[in-house]
Amino acid sequence: MRWKHKFRGGLVGFIGFLLSPLSWWNDLFVNVPLALAFAWLVSLAWPAGFGASFVLGYWLTNVLGFVLMHQGAKEFVAGEPQIYSRRELVKDALISLAYTLLIVVLIRSEILKPLPDYLPAK
């Protein structure tokens, strides 16, 4: 039954990769629609929170991507289910936060211009 855990670990890791910031090319097709759905749900109860919940939903999809990649890789290598500790969750969340801050700094310093047509004129 070891092959089942390797297959499951590989599948979970692949789904995590698609959600993670490492697959930047897939944001438009996976992370943004998921974040949009999350923001719509939040805005049903709190209409003013649409923008903030969209950003939070996007960030959460990236954190979930790291978590799934980490879990999937551990299960694939071990060939059996692995326990995901709170410490590992905190580490993955901090990595995602650092990645987010890096992107914000690159956009603020105008090294990256992700949506130039939508940014307000200076």
Image: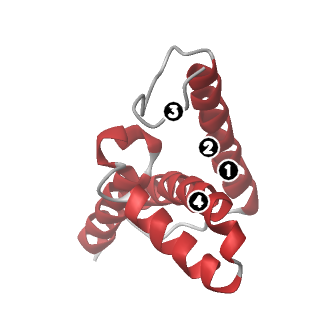
Which label is found at residue 93?
1
Name the disc covering residue 119, or none.
Answer: 3
Distance Cα–Cα, label 2 vs label 1: 5 Å
The residue where tag 2 is placed is: 96
Give x and y (percent) for residue 31.
Answer: 41, 57
Q: Quadrant of residue 118?
A: top left
- Label 4, secondary structure: give it: helix
Mark 1 element type: helix
Regarding mark 3 in the picture, which secondary structure is present there?
Answer: loop
Q: Earlier in the sequence, mark 1 or mark 4?
A: 4
Determine the residue positioned at 51% across, 32% down.
Answer: 119
**Which one is earlier in the sequence, the residue at label 3 or at label 4?**
4
Q: Position of residue 97 (x, y in %)?
A: 68, 42
Q: Residue at x 67, y 32 (%)?
A: 101
Circles 1 and 4: CB atoms closer than 8 Å: no
| Cα separation between marks 1 and 3 | 28 Å
Say which quadrant the C terminus sits in: top right
Mark 2–mark 1 contact, CB under 8 Å?
A: yes
Q: Report the residue that reaches farthest toward the bottom.
A: 45
* Position in image of residue 105 (x %, y %): 65, 23
- On the picture, is 108 further left or further right than 28? right
User: How far is the residue under mark 3 from the one under mark 4?
Assistant: 24 Å
Q: Earlier in the sequence, mark 4 or mark 2?
A: 4
Left or right of 104 on screen, residue 13: left
Tell me: residue 116, above or below residue 13: above
Q: Nearer the viewer, mark 1 or mark 3?
A: 3
Which element type, helix, strand or loop, lies under badge 2? helix
Instruction: Say which mark, if any, is on residue 60.
Output: 4
